[in-house]
Amino acid sequence: MSVTVRVPAKVNVQLAVGAARADGFHDLANVFLAVGLYDEVTVAPAGELRVTCEGPDADQVPLDRTNLAARAALALAERRGIEAAVHIHIAKDIPVAGGMAGGSADGAGALLACDALWKTGASRAELLSICAELGSDVPFSLVGGAALGTGRGERLTALEVGGSFHWVFAMAGRGLSTPAVFREFDRLAQGRDIPEPVASQPLLDALAKGDPDALAAAVSNDLQPAAISLFPELADTLAAGRTAGALAALVSGSGPTTAFLARDPESAAKVAEALRSSGTCATVRTAAGPAPGATVVKG
């Protein structure tokens, strides 16, 4: 028997970042939107815990116990007093190290799959608690849709979304380390008073109304200057998307994937084609959001 879970990527339509805390983390106001790019995580009984991976950039995915999918299996097994003897196979379609929570998605997917395989009967609250222990973005990968993440992003409040938003994602030729981007944020912020992060009410209203123009006027990412500082070529990709007619252009999360909001599927296709021919990125994908969170699709 095996269980397969499909789990979405995310884009941050707002990422407000506070000053560094004593524990090294930052308080955030992080507005997540799940989008229709998915990894599929399959778990099956095995003699011991092992991880395999296929798909774009699979060679960049760690296959040891540092992988969030493996850590998720170990965390649930430890709570239940059982051995995490499973084969976890990840079919990747979410960009690796791209600021779209691919690793977090795999952690949430493996957790839900192991829960179903082992029939642990874990409550939603317990699963979310384990997700929060695994990483700041993992809880949202479990729930999907749209949500405001506070604290370091792990405390979620579901948000209403009044329609579908169409996105184009341009993937860079190399990754960016999230910790490195936060360190650069801290370096750039030296000597400045950083306000407490709060969600933008116009942005929340735009999501609730399903209004792409209003959303375009409100999207923001406080990590974008740090990402561009470390990866200056991202500015060229952002400019190419804007020139192609995107309503908004921003770095997704800690990058280096760049995200472009389009008015409709036809506009998204035009922006995508222009980005493909611009020479400023490696690959281009289109997707709409919101998308459902981690979902058992087999087993």
Image: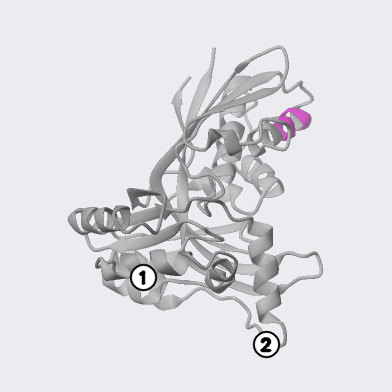
Which residue is rendered at x = 27% and y = 72% of the image? 213
**In the image, is residue 178 part of the stretch drawn in magenta?**
no
Task: Check the image and name the residue furthest to the front.
Answer: 279
What's drawn in magenta, residue-wise?
74-78
For the residue pair 73 and 270, the one nearer the viewer reads as: 270
For the residue pair 256 and 155, the one nearer the viewer reads as: 256
Q: How is the image coloured?
A: one colour
- Assess disc 1: are there few (<14), some (14-19) or many (≥20) residues with their C-alpha within 10 Å of its C-alpha: some
Residue 248 lies left or right of residue 97; in this view the side is left
Give the prevailing secondary structure in the magenta stretch. Answer: helix
Q: Position of residue 52 (x, y in %)?
A: 60, 25
Residue pointed to by mark 2:
193
Q: Spatial distance from mark 1 to mark 2, Cα to Cα? A: 29 Å
Q: Position of residue 159 (x, y in %)?
A: 44, 60
Q: Position of residue 271 (x, y in %)?
A: 26, 59
Which residue is rendered at x = 28% and y = 70% of the image? 243
**What element does badge 2 sit on?**
loop
Residue pointed to by mark 1:
239
Residue 17 visible? The answer is: yes
**Looking at the image, is 245 positioned above or below residue 141?**
below
Residue 143 lies left or right of residue 272; in this view the side is right
For the residue pair 283 and 94, the one nearer the viewer reads as: 283
